């Protein structure tokens, strides 16, 4: 069910926000696209100006913009919502109104009270919600089953997403699963990233094992591996 709120006049804002609070109390999670930087700060301000208490900060918030950038920006070059629609969902909007024009159209309505031009805005909002739902499902599938994922994704970006929620064991396990036997540059970067996470969150011994593996089984040269291994021998084992 997609539910949209519409204010025919500014005096309706308090009633709308009260109804919104009642709806949000039924759910423990908020999903948005760039909501952390835009939507939620705006809502907080409107609640304050209307002298209403709100509990937005008590909700878990999944802002799809940031994990989308990690997973797909380097692959598709465009991590906007409509860009991901085309790349992931094979869907292209037609006769859609750009989001940047919507505030102006609303202010025009307040002057003219003509509803017809608002139809495209309602359609635009519905497509945003449905696209977010579809992308959330794809994202969840990749997070849960990366080796069986149908859609292309940035492997290093996935590991960074794990790190963002401190899934260290899952990160290490997934890094090993995502590495192929070809020992190519992508695999090297995955294992190097894993080693730095092991150094900070796991054990330095496990990190050292990964560095030794990188030196022995990869033909790629990166001085950071030698530097980190030398520091490990000096500081941890005292083997100068």
Image: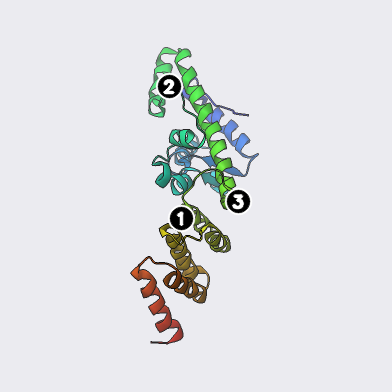
What residue is rendered at 50% in x and 37% in y?
88
Q: Secondary structure at mark 3?
A: helix
The image quadrant that residue 223 belongs to is bottom left
Residue 137: percent from left, percent from top? 58, 41
Residue 18 visible, this orientation = yes
Look at the image and name its color scheme: rainbow
146, above or below 176, in the image: above
- Residue under pointer 3: 144
Q: Are marks 2 and 3 in contact (CB under 8 Å)?
A: no
130, above or below 223, in the image: above
- Residue under pointer 2: 106
Looking at the image, tell me whether mark 2 or mark 3 is earlier in sequence order.
Answer: 2
Horizontal side of residue 144 vs 90, given as left or right: right
Residue 80: percent from left, percent from top? 42, 37
What residue is rendered at 35% in x and 67% in y?
222
Which numbered marker is on residue 156? 1
């Amino acid at each position: 069910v997609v539910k949209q709120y519409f204010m025919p006049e500014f005096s309706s804002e308090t009633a709308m926000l009260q109804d919104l609070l009642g709806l949000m109390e039924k759910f423990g999670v908020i999903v948005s696209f760039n909501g952390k930087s835009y939507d939620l700060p705006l809502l907080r301000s409107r609640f304050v100006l209307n002298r209403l208490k709100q509990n937005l900060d008590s909700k878990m918030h999944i802002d799809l913009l940031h994990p989308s950038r990690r997973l797909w920006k380097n692959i598709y070059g465009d991590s906007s919502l409509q860009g991901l629609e085309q790349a992931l969902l094979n869907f292209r909007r037609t006769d859609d109104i750009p989001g940047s024009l919507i505030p102006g159209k609303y202010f025009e309505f307040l002057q003219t009270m003509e509803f017809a031009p608002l139809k495209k805005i309602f359609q635009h909002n519905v497509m945003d919600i449905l696209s977010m739902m579809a992308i959330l499902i794809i994202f969840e599938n990749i997070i849960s089953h990366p080796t069986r994922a149908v859609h292309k994704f940035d492997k290093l970006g996935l590991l960074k997403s794990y790190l963002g929620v401190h899934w260290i064991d899952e990160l290490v396990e997934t890094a090993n699963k995502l590495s192929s036997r070809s020992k190519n540059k992508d695999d090297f970067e995955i294992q190097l990233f894993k080693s730095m996470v092991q150094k900070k969150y796991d054990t330095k011994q496990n990190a050292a094992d990964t560095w030794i593996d990188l030196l022995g089984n990869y033909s790629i040269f990166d001085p950071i591996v030698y530097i980190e291994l030398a520091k490990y021998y000096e500081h941890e084992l005292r083997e100068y």
